[in-house]
Amino acid sequence: MWVYRGGDWRAGVAETVSPRAATVTYRPSSARGTGVDTLTASYMVPRADVDPLLDRAPQRR
């Protein structure tokens, strides 16, 4: 997903969700670090692009 933080849309991943909000891990800048925040739906939109630092590879069985 894309998350709106700091006046810009950032790549993010939902960790937990509820009917009212989601806890997301996102990239607050172009650096390798991440941030975690709880956001309502108005600050999130779907993301199709792959982010190599956030998106986990599917686990093999």
Image (cartoon, grey):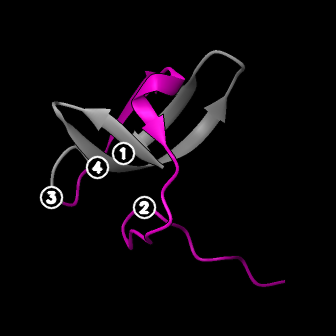
Measure the alpha-carbon separation of dots 3 and 4. 8 Å
Marking on residue 54 = 2
Measure the alpha-carbon separation of dots 1 and 2. 8 Å
Three-letter code, disc 3: Ala
Q: Magenta: predominant secondary structure element?
A: loop
Contact check, label 1 and label 2, Cβ < 8 Å: yes
- Label 3: which secondary element: loop
Contact check, label 1 and label 4, Cβ < 8 Å: yes
Contact check, label 3 and label 4, Cβ < 8 Å: yes
Three-letter code, disc 1: Tyr
Q: Position of residue 7 (x, y in %)?
A: 16, 32
7 up-or-down from 59: above or below: above
Residue at position x 55%, y 68% in the image: 56
In front: 21, or 41?
Answer: 41
Marking on residue 31 = 3
Marking on residue 26 = 1
Does residue 31 appear to the left or right of 4 in the view shown?
A: left
Measure the alpha-carbon separation of dots 3 and 2. 12 Å
Q: Position of residue 59 (x, y in %)?
A: 71, 77
- Label 1: which secondary element: strand
The residue range painted magenta reads 32-61
Whichever of callouts 1 and 2 sits on the residue coming sooner in the sequence is: 1
Three-letter code, disc 4: Arg
